[in-house]
Image (cartoon, rainbow, N blue to C red):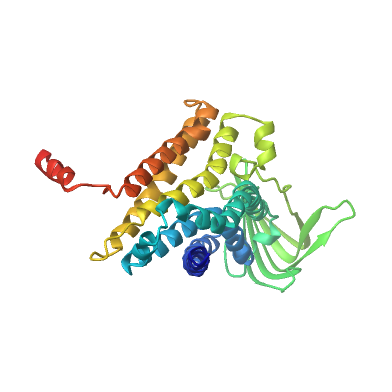
């Protein structure tokens, strides 16, 4: 039918444009945030692009929900604004006839939302945590940076080097200080390099230097000159602490704790939000041609923010055991669906959502 093909074609064009705008905003925001983490030393600068990509994958489900809702609202609002909807309604096309072509357009997007909510979100979180943990638990040699004092997270050592070879195999003008049992040890040397023993232990071998040992405030410091001095490099196994957000969906159901059930309720709520907002956009798009369409966009933003925040509240309640899991899984979405049916009923009977008398009573009450 011409009506359905025209609607789906315009929805596809609009959805593509909306998604590209949202993706650009997401990439810009994540780049600023993650580059800030790299500048403060919380992540490896070489992992910035990977972390940005993983973050985008994690939030694709949310972006697709917003894309679906806004694109339907934009297209139908424009049809009302240009009186195209009046023509279709006068031709015998009822408001409920919009559900079928919009649902056909929305089905692939909703399937993608299901995939990214149940698979993409936990996978991207798990990979991000692993990358961060690998950087935080790296060995002491990887901490070194020419011209900077660096403190080891596993020992009480502070390193300073003037220069380093590209492969980190050789360093020049080394300063190492450590504190143990109230005594300070300071080591300085002209050059140094790394060596790996047969046992697998790694050492920084310092050459042609001095070692100063003593207790601060006492004059009896011991000075030792050396030609070679080995400092063992400590390292830790990379362990990423699992959380509910990084746990796969099957594992959430195998271990039904409060956090896991709350996380599952949140993931399952994303496709349900998409379905409800898809249906809500149809009656919400009603537009008086004589007025601007800004109010519809404002309403869409407020509705989405309210809905998503309520889903977060439900997740928190389920995690704390204040709400049964089954109730938290469906209660919010059933209430919103009932609201959607009511708004549909008002629009089919050509009744306004808000009457002038309601605003007058509200102004008098205030």
Q: Nearer the viewer, residue 55 or 219?
A: 55
As drawn, is 273 to the left or to the right of 363? right
Write the residue at 36% across / 57% down.
285
Specify whether residue 182 is in view: no
- Tell whether 262 sits left or right of 296: right
| Residue 253 placement, left or right of 349 | right
The residue drawn where x is 34% and y is 63% is 86
Residue visible at 55% across and 62% down? 38
The percent coordinates of residue 315 (x first, y second) are 49, 36
x and y percentages locating residue 213 in the rendered image: 65, 51
Identify the residue at image location x=50%, y=57%.
Answer: 102
Q: Quadrant of residue 248?
A: top right
**How far from the left and from the top, in percent, is residue 343?**
35, 45
Is 135 situated above or below 271?
below
**Residue 293 in the image, given as x and y percentages of width and height:** 30, 63
Judging depth in this view, the residue of 209 and 83 nearest the camera is 83
| In this view, 140 is above or below 192 | above
- In front: 314, or 360? 360
- Counting every numbered tag in the picture gives 0
């Amino acid at each position: 039918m011409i009506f359905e093909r025209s609607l789906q074609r315009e929805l596809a064009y609009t959805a593509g444009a909306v998604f590209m705008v949202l993706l650009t905003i997401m990439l810009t925001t994540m780049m600023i945030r993650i580059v800030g983490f790299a500048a403060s030393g919380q992540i490896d600068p070489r992992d910035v692009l990977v972390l940005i990509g993983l973050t985008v994958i994690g939030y694709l489900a949310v972006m697709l929900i917003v894309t679906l809702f806004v694109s339907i609202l934009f297209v139908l609002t424009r049809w009302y604004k240009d009186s195209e909807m009046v023509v279709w309604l006068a031709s015998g096309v009822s408001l409920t006839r919009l559900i079928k072509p919009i649902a056909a357009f929305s089905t692939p997007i909703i399937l993608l939302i299901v995939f990214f909510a149940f698979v993409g979100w936990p996978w991207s979180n798990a990979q991000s945590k692993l990358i961060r943990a690998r950087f935080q638990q790296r060995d002491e040699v990887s901490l070194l940076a020419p011209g900077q004092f660096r403190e080891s997270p596993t020992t009480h050592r502070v390193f300073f080097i003037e220069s380093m070879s590209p492969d980190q195999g050789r360093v020049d003008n080394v300063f190492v200080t450590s504190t143990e049992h109230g005594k300070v040890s300071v080591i300085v040397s002209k050059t140094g390099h790394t060596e790996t023993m047969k046992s697998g232990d790694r050492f920084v071998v310092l050459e042609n230097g001095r070692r100063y040992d003593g207790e601060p405030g006492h004059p009896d410091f011991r000075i030792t000159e050396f030609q070679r001095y080995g400092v063992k490099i400590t390292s830790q196994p990379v362990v990423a602490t699992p959380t509910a957000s990084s746990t796969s969906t099957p594992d959430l159901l195998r271990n039904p704790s409060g956090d896991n059930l709350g996380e599952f309720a949140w993931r399952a709520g994303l496709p349900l939000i998409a379905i409800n907002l898809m249906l809500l956009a149809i009656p919400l798009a009603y537009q008086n041609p004589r007025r601007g369409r800004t109010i519809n966009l404002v309403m869409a933003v407020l509705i989405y923010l309210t809905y998503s925040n309520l889903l977060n509240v439900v997740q928190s309640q389920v995690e704390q055991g204040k709400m049964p899991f089954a109730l938290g899984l469906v209660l919010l979405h059933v209430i919103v669906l009932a609201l959607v049916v009511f708004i549909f009923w008002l629009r089919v009977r050509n009744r306004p959502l808000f009457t002038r008398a309601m605003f007058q009573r509200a102004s008098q009450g205030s």
